[in-house]
Amino acid sequence: DQQVKQNSPSLSVQEGRISILNCDYTNSMFDYFLWYKKYPAEGPTFLISISSIKDKNEDGRFTVFLNKSAKHLSLHIVPSQPGDSAVYFCAASAPGNTGKLIFGQGTTLQVKP
Amino acid sequence: DAGVIQSPRHEVTEMGQEVTLRCKPISGHDYLFWYRQTMMRGLELLIYFNNNVPIDDSGMPEDRFSAKMPNASFSTLKIQPSEPRDSAVYFCASSLAWGGYTFGSGTRLTVV
């Protein structure tokens, strides 16, 4: 049972344009959401997060939006750069403050020069 | 800090052999997680430890998989016997009581 889903395996965007990566979840008890970025042959690294009490968090070119009623979050990258080409994982914090994160399948973003 | 250290980086083994993956978490982190990355399921949690104690091993696929954390600075994930479907990238991550994970670089396992 996949509680966190990233339904788009890949996305291709032109440099300078906006990249939008989407993530859906099924468990309404999730209270914290994170995005991780992964380059080939490296481990995922933390990118940005959002608490369930907010609907938006911004950090430079990266903004995460949370729609709790739709159980949906998205990551916006503006403007996209070739160095942003990577696999992006959405993750949700399991209820009960267990420290456990549940990840989606990942979306491969390619930013073309 | 050198970060989370995993070894080996690559492992190729024959079906039926025992495989042991190793992880050294960041000093002071009290959570340690083992994940497996596959195309279908993304990053799949196998097991995690808190203060060296296994908390949730519900993600361990079969009895062929086992994990230990004998002390705060070392953990192993063992597969015995290994099968071709175990081929994947295995990640170890550590974190503080609550905080973002720090992942290791992963071990790419190929079982032939």
Image (spheres, helix red, strand yellow):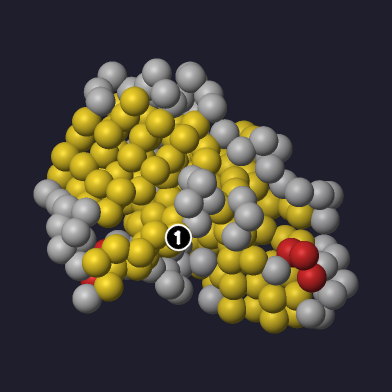
Quarter where residue A3 is shown: top right
Quadrant where the N terminus of chain A is found in the figure: top right
> Residue beneath label 1, please?
A10
The residue lying furthest to the left in this view is A60
- Residue A24 horizontal side relative to residue A58, left or right: right
Please name whichever residue, A79 or B48, is drawn nearer the observer in this view of the structure. A79
Image coordinates for residue B107, horizontal then vertical, percent: 57, 70
Q: Secondary structure at mark 1?
A: strand
Quarter where residue A30 is shown: top left
Q: Is residue A29 above or below residue B26?
A: above
Q: Is residue A49 above or below residue A78?
A: above
Please name whichever residue, A71 or B49, is drawn nearer the observer in this view of the structure. A71
Q: Amino acid at mark 1?
A: Ser
Image coordinates for residue A70, horizontal then vertical, percent: 42, 23
Q: Residue at x 69, y 81 (%)?
A: B12
Image coordinates for residue B93, horizontal then vertical, percent: 47, 53
Q: Residue at x 59, y 78 (%)?
A: B10
Q: How packed is label 1: few (under 14 Cα within 10 Å), some, or many (20 or more)?
A: some
Image coordinates for residue B20, horizontal then vertical, percent: 69, 67
Q: Residue at x 39, y 55 (%)?
A: A88
- Residue A9 horizontal side relative to residue A44, left or right: right
Q: Residue at x 30, y 49 (%)?
A: A20
